[in-house]
Image (tube, rainbow, N blue to C red):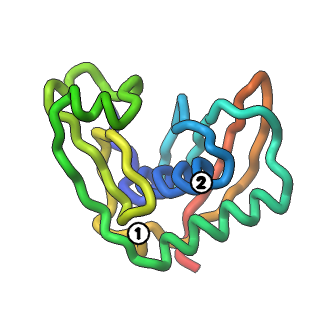
Amino acid sequence: MKEADPRMHSAEHVLTGALIQMFQCGRPFTTHLEKKKSKADYHFTRELTAEEVREIERRVNDVVQQDLIVREEFVPRPEAANRFVLDRLPEEVGDIVRIVHIGDFDACPCSGVHVRSTREIGVFRIVSTTFEDGALRVRFKLGTE
């Protein structure tokens, strides 16, 4: 399995945390994380408005600027299953599940690589969003300014 860029992977966690706070949606059902541009697909009911896109970007960049520590916690699978949905974890994860915490902003089971603190992510920008057949796709990039 190809490892995602740590900045993009961490940015997806912050993006998802913002979407969950704003819309009470779940975590993405698919992601494609690349160094230049990434996308995440969420079960959703409609397209986002331009104002909502700007608010998501603002929230993500606020979290980035807070320089939150990204830490990991290891918990037994039954405990993790009581706290989180484990559907997207690879089978080889085993009996101990790693939970990635972005400060107190977001936490989820994850086997990917991440930055040490959110400031390493850089500037987050949503390139586009589309809605089709109950799926919201968010395409995003990272920059330095």
The quarter holding residue 54 reads bottom right
The C terminus: image quadrant: bottom right
Circle 1: residue type: Thr
The quarter holding residue 78 reads top left
Q: Position of residue 72 (x, y in %)?
A: 23, 53
- Residue 118's tag is 1
The N terminus: image quadrant: top left
Q: Are the residues at dot 1 and dot 2 in contact (C-beta closer than 8 Å)?
A: no
Instruction: Tally the marks.
Output: 2
Q: Position of residue 48 (x, y in %)?
A: 80, 47
Q: Position of residue 134 (x, y in %)?
A: 74, 26
Q: Counting residues from the N terminus, which is met first, the one under dot 1 or under dot 2?
A: 2
Residue at 60% across, 43% down: 39
Residue at 33% across, 28% down: 89
Circle 2 residues within 10 Å: few <14, some 14–19, many ≥20: some
Q: Is residue 80 left or right of residue 30?
A: left
Circle 2 residue: 21
Label 1 to label 2: alpha-carbon separation: 18 Å
Task: Determine whether 121 is above or below 83 in the image.
Answer: below
The quarter holding residue 86 reads top left
